[in-house]
Structures are given as C-alpha cells and as structure tokens.
Image (cartoon, rainbow, N blue to C red):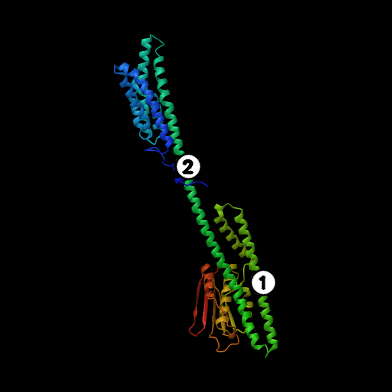
Amino acid sequence: MTTTGEDHEPARGGPWWWDRRRGAVLDVSLGVVSALECAAEGVPFARDAGIPPAMGVVFGLLAGSMLVVRRKWPIAVVLVALAITPAEMGFLMGVVGLYTMAASELPRRIIGALAGMTFLGTLVVTFVRLGQDMARDGLDLGDWFLPFASIATSLGMTAPPLLLGLYVGQRRRLMESLRERADSLERELQLLAERAEERAEWARGEERTRIAREMHDVVAHRVSLMVVHAAALQAIARKDPEKAVKNAALVGDMGRQALTELREMLGVLRSGGGGARAERASVPLAAVGVAAAAAASRAAEDGESSSEGPCLSELDELIGQSEAAGMVVNLSVEGAERAYAAEVESTAFRVVQEALTNVHKHAAGAKTHVRLAHRVSEIAMQVENEPPPEVSSASSARLPSGGNGLVGMKERVAALGGVFVSGPTDAGGFRVSAVIPAS
C-alpha cells in the first residue's frame, strides 16, 4: 500500500538547516576539503601578493569553509567562489556551489546570471594567467590557442556542474510531483472505498427492507386468512361439519401457498447470497465495498427477475379468498384494463392485499369496497371498509399486528413516485388510497 505524503517527508534529524545527519556530514566534509584546498592555494597567492604566507593560509581556510553552507545559501557560495577566482583558489567550491545553485529552487534567471558571471570570470582569469605563463616560458602556439584554451577551460568548469544540477533539480521536482499525485490518488481511492462501503451498507439496508416487506406481504395475508378460517372452523365444527371440512381444506390450501412462496423467496436469497460471497472472495480487500454493492445490486436484480411478484390479474383470486373467509367484498374497476410494469402491478396488488389483511385483523366481518381506476398516466386504488359488526364469528381470532403494514405500503408507493393516504372515515370505517404512476 502506498504511504501517505506525510510518510514521504524526510525526518528532520540533522542539526540546524540539514534535514538529515548524513547531509550535514557530507557538507562538513566538503567544507574541510575545500578549506584545505584553498589554504594550500593561499600560499602561492600570498607569495605573489607580497603578504605573509600565514595570512594566505588563513584567508584560504575562511573562504573554503563557506562550502559548508551551500544548501542554505548557495548564492553566497557561488559569489565567494567567483570573488577568489582571480587568486586561482576555490576550484572545488566553485564547481560544487554552481551545482548546488542549479539544483535548488532559485529562479532560472538568477541561476543563469550567476552561471554567466562564473563563466566570464573563469574565462578572463584563465586567459590572463595562461597568457602570462606562455609569455614567461616563451611559448608560441599560435593566436588561436589562447582563446580556445580559455573558452574550453571555462566551459569545462561551468557547464558540467550547471547541467547536472539542473537535471537533478528537475528530477527531484518531478519525483515530488509524482509523489503528490500518488498521494492524491491514494486519498481519492480511500474516499471511493469509503463511499463504496457506504453504498454497500445502504444497498444491504435496502435489501433487508425489501426482504422484510416481501416476507410481510407473503406471510401476513395468508396467515391472517388461515387464523380467520381456523377461528370460524372452531365455531362451526359441531354445528356444520361439511362447512368445517371446507374451511379446513381452505386453511390447508393457504398454508401450502404460503410455504411455496416462502420457499421461492428463500431460494432467491440463497442464490443471491452465494453470489455475493463468491464475489467478495475473489476481489482484494480494497474493493470489498464495491463488490458488496455490486453483489447486493445483482441479488436484488436476480430476485426481481426470478420472481416478478403478483399482478393485477390475480386480484379476483385475492378477493375470493377474503370472501371465503366470510368478508363481503365489492370490487369495482374503472377504465380500460391494460398491462403495467411488473413493479407497478406488484405494488398495486400488495396495497390491496395489505388493506384486506388489515380489515381481517381490525374489522373482521366488515363490508369492504375495493375500487381500481385505470387512468391515462397512473393507476389508482382504494380499499374502504365499513364499521365492523358488533358480533363477528372471526372476532375471536385476535390477530396480532406489528404496526408495519401501513408503513410498508407507503414505502412501496413512495418508491415508485406515487402518493399514499390512509386513515379512518367519518362513518367509523377505514380507508386506504394510493395512486401510482403508470411508468
């Protein structure tokens, strides 16, 4: 894993302005070598200048030791090297100082100006000294030799350290830029991983909600009817054996239907869960969030594709089951029937189913009106029950209620961009209304 930008920063463990101890050791070593060189070159300089040799040595030591501060003040090092060039001193200091200045973050115009001054100073000093030596030794190598030798010497002392310093500085800046980009990319990847994990958690929550809603729709209606029939069976078992047998058969049929729907749903969950586990096992840890989101999405898609859910054509069968349980249900349909998207038909069916289930739970025996309207761009449904009778054969069933039916219906309708309203009527009954866009 790539480390962060803070980890790339060098640890400041050196004294004063040095980032590292080895940098301080290197600069001090170069300063000592430069001081010794300048001290040795200070003896002939003092002899030519007519001063005591000790003064030339001290001057050389002081001038050469300036190389120690090359990282902090590279311009000062180059200027000192340029100042002692006429004395034929500071060869090492001039080369190292020029390299350090070129590799630093100084503006290009300052580096170019000082490099040009160093080149001109070396050229003039070389031209004068070499001319004096040739005249003293009586050498005559032609008029071209002196300028050529001076230019070659100046270029040899300035061009290599300058070009090397520019290359090292540019490479250093490039590496820093690449490191910053890598750190930025890592932060973005971490952010994406966090967002992917959030999306995966959201997808898992949505899937849990969807599964809970489907389980409620499958179990609540079937089991409620079974409990109602069982209560009725208990009441008429001795009085009307034939009707009791009929009710028992209905209870068995509804139980088998509920078990079949539960098995289908559990089969979808098993196949979807296996795909998610396989997906997670085949990807790196950094992509777990993305894989989880994709797996949850695929599981949801697989669940929808393998079991599209009920449709409006099954509405007559649903109402027939409620009528078989002793409820009086009137169904009215407005508009021309047409096909809708699977999720629209499934939601409309579930709303009617849950509303009828609530009537069985809270108003057993009440007359119920189911209205379905096919409109141009939407489908509307309404389930309204009248006040329950004072005495009902099914009232002793005491059906439990979790209080999630209306919430689940509202969530289903809202997910499709529809409107859901429920509440008691003035007559003492209860009304459930929903409008769902057709597309």
Residue 124 appears in view: no
Residue position marked by numbered label 1 in the rendering: 260
Q: x%, y% of residue 228?
A: 61, 82
Q: How many marks?
A: 2
- Whole-angstrom CA distance, mark 1 to mark 2, is 60 Å
In the depicted view, which residue is nearer to us: 421 or 61? 61
Query: Is residue 345 depicted above or below 6 in this figure?
Result: below
For the view shown, which residue lies furthest in the left direction?
A: 51
Q: Determine which quarter of the picture holds residue 340.
A: bottom right
In the depicted view, which residue is nearer to us: 367 or 177? 177
At 54% from the left and 64% from the top, the residue drawn is 205
Q: x%, y% of residue 248?
A: 68, 82
Query: Is residue 100 depicted above or below 297 in this figure?
Result: above
Q: What amino acid is found at the position of numbered circle 2 in the picture?
A: Leu
Residue position marked by numbered label 2 in the rendering: 178
Q: x%, y% of residue 100?
A: 40, 32
The local secondary structure at tag 2 comes to helix
In the depicted view, which residue is nearer to us: 257 or 118? 118
Q: Residues within 10 Å of mark 2 (few under 14, many from 20)?
A: few
At 33% from the left and 22% from the top, the residue drawn is 57
Q: What amino acid is found at the position of numbered circle 1 in the picture?
A: Thr
Q: Residues within 10 Å of mark 1 (few under 14, many from 20)?
A: few
Q: x%, y% of residue 357?
A: 58, 78
Q: Quadrant of the C terminus?
A: bottom right
